[in-house]
Image (cartoon, rainbow, N blue to C red):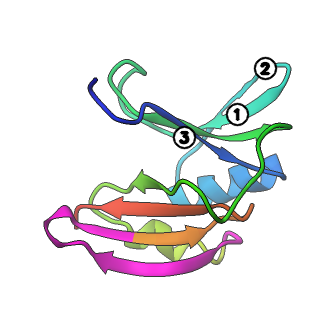
């Protein structure tokens, strides 16, 4: 096993609002995909699915946003300040500001536009 995680989904109740939120804070375009029961907006990742960890904002009847449960961290490379600074403007709320975690860099936690709690991680 190369990674403990290879896919994650962030539930939404308002798919378009959630897409706009994540495109704003990540300064990136999400790729749309749809099946009969699920709409997905794929978050950017490097490589192919065999080598990378991927995820998506999703709209599906069986998934509901939640402020409790698993906490996923989005990789921000060397800078989580920029995406974190866009959270409130995009309709979210900062729960934990940029916080040092020793030699593993920095993390921050926010509530997104749908009510999910999501983390950010950066090396610097």
Residue 27's x, y, as percent?
Answer: 52, 55
77 vs 31: above or below? below
Dot 2 corresponds to which residue? Answer: 35
Dot 1 corresponds to which residue? Answer: 40
51 vs 105: above or below? above
- Name the secondary structure under disc 2: loop
Residue 39's x, y, as percent?
Answer: 77, 32
Q: CA distance from mark 3 to mark 2?
A: 17 Å
The answer to whether 54 appears left or right of 38 in the picture is: left
- Name the secondary structure under disc 1: strand
The answer to which image quadrant residue 120 occupies is bottom left
Asked if residue 106 is among those painted magenta in the image, a careful observer would answer: yes
At 54% across and 40% down in the image, what residue appears?
43
| Marks 1 & 2, CB-CB < 8 Å contact | yes
Number of other residues with Cα within 10 Å of mark 2, as a class: few under 14, some 14 to 19, many 20 or more: few
Q: Quadrant of the N terminus?
A: top left
Sooner in the amino-acid sequence: mark 3 or mark 2? 2
At 24% across and 72% down in the image, what residue appears?
101
| Marks 1 & 3, CB-CB < 8 Å contact | no
The answer to whether 89 appears left or right of 47 in the picture is: right
Dot 3 corresponds to which residue? Answer: 43
Sooner in the amino-acid sequence: mark 1 or mark 2? 2
Asked if residue 19 is among those painted magenta in the image, a careful observer would answer: no
Range covered by the magenta-colored residues: 90-107
Front residue of 1 and 74: 1
- Name the secondary structure under disc 3: loop
Q: Quadrant of the C terminus?
A: bottom left
Residue 45's x, y, as percent?
Answer: 43, 36
Q: CA distance from mark 1 to mark 2?
A: 8 Å
Front residue of 124 and 101: 101
Q: CA distance from mark 1 to mark 3?
A: 9 Å
113 vs 60: above or below? below
């Amino acid at each position: 096993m190369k990674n403990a995680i290879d896919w994650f989904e962030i539930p939404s109740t308002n798919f378009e609002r959630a897409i706009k939120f994540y495109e704003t804070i990540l300064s990136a375009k999400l790729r749309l995909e749809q099946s009969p029961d699920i709409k997905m907006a794929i978050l950017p990742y490097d490589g192919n699915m065999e080598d990378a960890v991927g995820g998506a904002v999703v709209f599906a009847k069986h998934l509901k946003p939640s402020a409790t449960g698993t906490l996923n961290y989005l990789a921000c490379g060397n800078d989580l300040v920029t995406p974190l600074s866009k959270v409130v403007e995009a309709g979210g709320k900062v729960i934990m500001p940029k916080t040092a975690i020793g030699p593993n860099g920095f993390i921050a936690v926010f509530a997104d536009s749908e009510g999910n709690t999501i983390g950010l991680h950066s090396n610097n």
